Amino acid sequence: MFSSGAASISPSSAGRVSGPSPATDTARAAHRRKLGLRTVALVYLGLLLLAPVAMIFYRTFEHGLEPVWNSITAPNAEHAFWLSIEIVAIAVPLNTIFGIGIALLLERGRFWGKAVLGLIIDLPFAISPVVVGLSLILVYGKTGWFGDWLSEQGFQVIFSIPGMVIATAIVSLPFVARETVPVLRELGTDAEQAAETLGAGPWQTFWRVTLPGIRWGVVYGVVLTTARALGEFGAVSIVSGRIEGQTQTLPLYVQDRFENFDSTGAYTAAVVLALLALGTLLAMNLLTRRTRRKAEG
Amino acid sequence: MLICCNSILMLLVFPMQKVAMQTRTLTVAVSLLAVLAAALGLTACGSSSSSSNSLALVAYSTPQGAYEKLIPAFQATSEGKGVSFSQSFGPSGEQSRAVANGLHADVVNFSLAPDVEKLVKAGLVSPSWNQNATHGFVTNSVAVIIVRKGNPKHITGWNDLIKPGVGVLTPNPFTSGSARWNIMAAYGAQLKEGKTPAQALEYLKALFGNVVSQDSSARNALQTFLAGRGDALIDYEDEAISDEKKGAAIEYIVPSATILIQNPIAVLSGGNTAEAQKFVNYLLSPAGQAIWVSKGYRPVISGVPGAEKFPTPKSLFTIESLGGWKTVTKQFFEPETGIVTKIEQSLGVSTSK
Amino acid sequence: MSQRPNSASLQALPARRAPALGARGAGALGKGLLGIYLSILVLLPVAALLSKASTGGTHAFWREVSNPEAVAAIKLTLITSAIVVVINAVFGTLVAWVLVRDEFPGKGIVNALIDLPFALPTIVAGVVLLALYGKNSPLGIDVAFTRASVGLALLFVTLPFVVRSVQPVLLELDLAMEEAAASLGASPWTVLRRIVLPTLAPAIISGVALSFARAVGEFGSLVLITGNLPFKTDAGSVYIFGQIQDENLAAAAAVSVVLLLAALLVIALLTFALRRRSRHVL
């Protein structure tokens, strides 16, 4: 679903009108059409995408490099950075493992209610992050369902890192499953059936045959999950308790700096986030290119 | 903390090592359990330890800058030596709700008293929290009108805000405690000027007619104003002072009739109460109050150096003179029957699509 | 793109083992764990939400949902999301077309940046859009604090969905059909309408579903830019936030449920339409 369009297809194949018009006029018209489309697309992207990106970088560095360095090395900033990484390091593997399991169930499993399972997986797409935060408080908050019991056991879920991990996992849940399902479908069961007739147990089949086959779907899913988890703001802001230096992720820190009129600090943290996101993107594009090269032999 | 996190790191790495297991089931199960255990392990790390030397401060967003000075100053005293702090700042109502829902706190400092009363109801704060010399308040301020530098629209008081063509900013009273102070300031000022309640309500209607933006918090409203929206922002005096200091192109007017904004502070029972009380005592002491004054807050005790710089409005009134927060909230801000709700609805219905 | 295991790996498999019990156990264990995971992450929170929304019964639910400010917020969110999604469908397809069928310097970079809004945290999106299209806009465009600002923010965060859904399909599209149609006398417009668009339709629909869901739920990027005028620019999710702040958890839950159902309905309808379409594809 998220492949890069690097293929070079001859652009001159847009429709040709056969009729009384001479060939050169048609080619010119086609060319004009192509240029027109390109201009519209680029203007749209320029306004909506490129300008904002340029703005982030401009606003960050407009006062020079030193304020940026100070912002990066501020203790709260560093803590926010590592906290974000830590949360992602837990939520993403969990979502990957269970995402693959869900995809397997959806494509290879035989049971009633598959549609329901699919809907459950898509739920995080449909819930606003704010609502995710709200529902977590309803479940784990002191006045919620399990709050009292949990605090008696000494577990602090809400307003602590576990709650933030759960919130992050929820909003980034669907990606691995969604990316893996189509690949599983295309892979087909032939190889798996062949493996079974040759005597492989189900786990061996999974590890040696299925997993390598769905590898790229899983990888795409992981990259998307990571991007989503890194940038999660709404749900985490509600369940975090905003404790400086303890429960502030990088997105929360951006807001905190912005609210304290430390615009350089805010934009710097935003640049860090954007770079992490771009890094994830780069990994994605590199992998796409490898896939295409493999597919083209 | 470090040891805790190191062991968690090891748990995360463990499943990645290729361990020869008898069945794949076991491998997968162990990996899953390891990751889950890592998550739970973080629970143990994450759960707050209330050692006798740490205090958890949960406050509304405005005094964040003040605490940057107050806490180190407290830690320099004999009472505060060796005390470590965790700080959380956010919208007053949200913070109050968080504490009620389990956010660990030893000291709470909110924008208005009802946010502390919520915690009394939740059994976290003693009902006698405000039975002290300062009635539970730690700082005062007044509602002021912030305008652009040079005051191009020549705004001198509340009545100028309802003139046609004047854009007014105030946070959303249904999401921000600060906004409620602002509205009651405007309303109360009308009463103080001799208007009847009915006329004061007319004024409020006209005021809301001029409101061009209601951000979710006072901070956001300030951002919006600084971004160029509107001509006048109703805000706290201490915010105005700190922004002027930061060099924003603004100035502010203290209206002749305005409300005294009183911000409460309370110690939570069941936490590190002894140390927390020492901290609150410091904040109420002359030394602490002097720091508050330097940050633009009016003191709650007399004789604090620097307090002379605050102009005294001719007619200063408190929320008590309007009936107290309980009555005012019910009368004005009830989600369906409140006066302000009705005003907003009537404006929305006539001006929306 | 399917990967066939090579013969070497197949031959490396050991002889047939004792069947069933271990496998069934593992299957059950897996399903059980999966169930627990999904419950913790999705079912439990949604159940709590529904439960809270229905405290007080359907009467109270209806009252909370039909209060004028809630209605205005819901309407604003749904209508704006719908408009945004239509714009996305048109321009997203256009952008995908240009990226696949055209060549120009810097195309690779532009293509890589398409995913940025998706990967960028919403709070950053909000900050940047405010800087760019607010009062101090270097481009002289000021839409902050109007309804257009909500639309702009939503356009930004949903940009990649349609583009990335359509691109792969466009790549696979067989040009032979278009060329055949052209040689038979079809104008470019007819080719587009009769051949290209129908093939792209499932992908566009899929992208539209995702965009709509994301737009309806959008929060962080809207808080800063829109100015939150009740009844005018108070988007649904911001309204919910306000209700939460006010301790009206039941009201917040009620409106959340409505928005959630709306998004789910759209996703379900579109998925259904998709499945029906794909049955008609040759």
Image: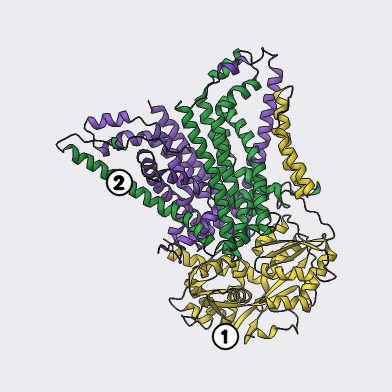
Chain colours: A green, B yellow, C purple
Image coordinates for residue B18, horizontal then vertical, percent: 70, 29
Residue closest to the eye, B333 or A161 = A161
- Residue A279 horizontal side relative to residue A244, left or right: left
Pair 1/2: label in front: 2
Q: What residue is pinned by disc 2? A: A35
Task: Residue type at mark 2: give it.
Answer: Leu
Q: Is residue C233 visible?
A: no
Badge count: 2
- Residue B312 horizontal side relative to residue C5, left or right: right
Q: Tell me, yes or no, whether dots 1 and 2 are on the same chain.
A: no
Image coordinates for residue B259, horizontal then vertical, percent: 63, 79
Task: Residue type at mark 1: give it.
Answer: Glu
Q: Give the answer, above or below, for where A184 lies relative to B58.
A: above
Q: Give the answer, above or below, for where A54 lies relative to A4.
A: below
Q: Is residue B346 visible?
A: yes
Q: What residue is pinned by disc 1? A: B193
Q: Give the answer, above or below, for where C58 lies relative to B164.
A: above
Q: Which mark is residue C10?
A: none
Circle 2: is it few (<14), some (14-19), or many (20+) Cα within 10 Å? Answer: some
